Amino acid sequence: MMASEEEINLLVIVVDVNPVWWGQQAQRETELSLSKCLDAVMVLGNSHLAMGRTNKLAVIASHCEDSHFLYPGKSWRAGDSGGDDAYSSGDGKYELLSVVNNLIAEEIRKVMSKTEVRGNSTDTLLAGTLAKALCYVNRVSKEFEAGQEIKSRILVIKAAEDCPRQYMNFMNVIFAAQKQNILIDACVLDSDSGLLQQACDITGGLYLKIPQKVALAQYLLWVFLPDSDQRSQLVLPPPAHVDYRAACFCHRNLIEIGYVCSVCLSIFCNFSPICTTCETAFKIQLPHMVKPKKKKLKQPS
Amino acid sequence: MWLADIMDEEPERAKRWEGGYERTWEVLKEDESGSLKATVEEILFQSKRKRVIESHGQVRLGMMRHLHVVVDCSRSMEDQDLKPNRLTSSLKLIETFVEEYFDQNPISQLGIITTKNKRAEKLTDLAGNAKKHIVALKKAVGTVCVGEPSLYNSLNLAIQTLKHMPGHTSREILIILSSLTTCDPANISELIKTLKSLKVRVSIIGLSAEVRVCTVLTRETGGSYHVILDESHFKELLMLHVKPPPASSSSECSLIRMGFPQHTIASLTDQDAKPSFSMSHLDSSSGAVLSLGGYFCPQCHAKYTELPVECKVCGLTLVSAPHLARSFHHLFPLQGFTESPAQELHADRCCQACQGELKDTSIFTCPSCRCVFCLECDLFIHDSLHCCPCCIHNQTNS
């Protein structure tokens, strides 16, 4: 069958729907609101599905409390086939596109109205969302037969700031994505994110900080719609300069030369006899102690 | 008489041929319609689960490793019980091993030694870069397998470099031995004593059958000895050595001075861009290419194109922060998930990581966040991801 030889492209879009950031955004200026951002995401999703018959899409919303799959829904639940009729838009649009749009709109309404922001932490749970996205991609790749090639990439649309506590989990996710040959692209709306820059560099994806937020849809279609094979033929934004210097554990300064504990791999800027993280005492090679010679004082004559 | 003494000292172990095979055909059971499908699925399921079981717990690991791989190139490697012959199959598997090794231990080093004709020679020196080893392994497929291997000579050659390594690193030797004989110029028990005093751990993978001297060698030095059943078992045994071993209690801990160079990318349109050679290519005849960007050593400003590398000019080890981050999951291993039958789950039958339906007979629960996962996600989380997706959500909330 011809269909089994076609390559399948899976695009997973992770949207940062941090309500604190979007609320502040609405107060500052009304150029880009959450609904306009999701419109741009739907445009990108529809275009991706229209590019090829076998292309697949998934959209995940990343909140401060949890992450939710906006599309696809849990389609194996009984009684879903009847619901499809309600989604057809009647204007002759390809039915899958209207299903996608309506599902996304319905789910995001549910997410934003029902999820409360509890606790003090208002950072977006990006590492957790990416982990779920990787599990989803892993499941989808296993569902196809051995002959079919599936190429996946994840696009992160980031609004709020980085959370430094997520560093280790983020790095685990990045290495897992690199091993599975999944590209991570990043479209940053507000402030630069060092973690995403590293993710794009290590996995081979694209990082872009959008100069004008209101043109989000244009940037998504220009830069992030073509898949990895086509990117070599386009002139895309140059790669960002990634700062790979490590931060020392004592002062959190970026250092160029440091000392690394051989047991727990913590980085220090100065030599110290005990590692503060794992409390191992280090063997120090002391030079031999030279006893000071007693000098005879010359008596003043 | 001394043979009987040695036999008494050896730990009591029932060999498989002594203990008797269980009746292996009884594992397969047919169901009412006469099909074996359920049993086959069960066997596949168990083999998938086996990989996830072991975990070390809070044991200090030797993260910086110096490993020598000794490959037997004697006449017995031309045997065709592994396709196409033992040598080609072993070299291919060692290539995969080298890639996995540098993936999991980015700040470690590896060297390859071959032995044939009663001699041993170095194929590649101890180095931290995977490419050199893979190129050398690909070239070695054409070597002629002749003569007998020499355990003594190969161990001696490995010791020459390992004894100069600093005390806080782990010194290991992995031998792939296919021949049943070895030709040694001197008494190997002396060498075993030297290995113990230098704290070198020797592990052996045998391709033919168990050899007594290998058992003694690995037992005395604290390594492991296995004999392969078939090619997939060979791969599994090789992959066991990718994880960092528990550090011996006598290894020292010290602070190692390392450099974290910046990656400079320059393009031709920059005014200040000066093309330069990379120091790592000066020794090789090919690959000496002028390039604009690269990593500059913070101490002596020598340029390198790839990390991790040891600076040839000033001796500083250059790494980048992600390389160290790759080893973190060994230090904070993810706990295993508890298995339970799927019938007990009354709530929604959905895996919370991949949103798929829970079709298997068992479900897996994370002990800390009590979220439910399917088998595929459990394998993926423990093999590649090393963190529970739901626990990450709870961590940043607290």
Image (cartoon, rainbow, N blue to C red):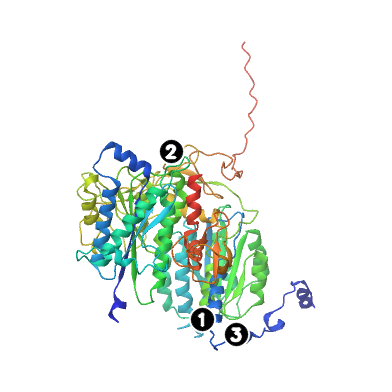
Q: Chain of mark 2?
A: A
Q: CA distance from mark 2 to mark 1?
A: 54 Å
Q: Chain of mark 1?
A: B
Along the line of sight, the residue nearer the viewer: A236 or B161:
A236
Q: Residue drawn 65% across and 53% down?
A: B250
Q: Is residue A287 above or below residue B374?
A: above
| Residue A226 in view here | no
Write down the quadrant of residue B213 in the picture. bottom right
Precedes in sequence: disc 3 or disc 1: 3
Q: Mark 1 Cα within 10 Å, few/some/many (few <14, many 20+)?
A: many
Q: Is residue A222 above or below residue B361?
A: above
Judged from the image, the secondary structure of the residue bearing numbered disc 2 is loop
Along the line of sight, the residue nearer the viewer: A280 or B362:
B362
Residue at the top extreme? A301
Q: Which residue is mark 1?
A: B77
Q: Amino acid at mark 3?
A: Lys
Tag in front: 2 or 1: 2
Dot label at residue A253: 2
Expressed as whole percent of the image width and height from the top left, the position of residue A108 reads: 35, 53
Q: Chain of mark 3?
A: B
Along the line of sight, the residue nearer the viewer: B331 or B187:
B331
Expressed as whole percent of the image width and height from the top left, the position of residue A172 reads: 45, 55
Q: Amino acid at mark 1?
A: Met
Q: CA distance from mark 3 to mark 1?
A: 39 Å
| Residue B236 in view here | yes
Judged from the image, the secondary structure of the residue bearing numbered disc 1 is helix
Q: Which residue is mark 3?
A: B29
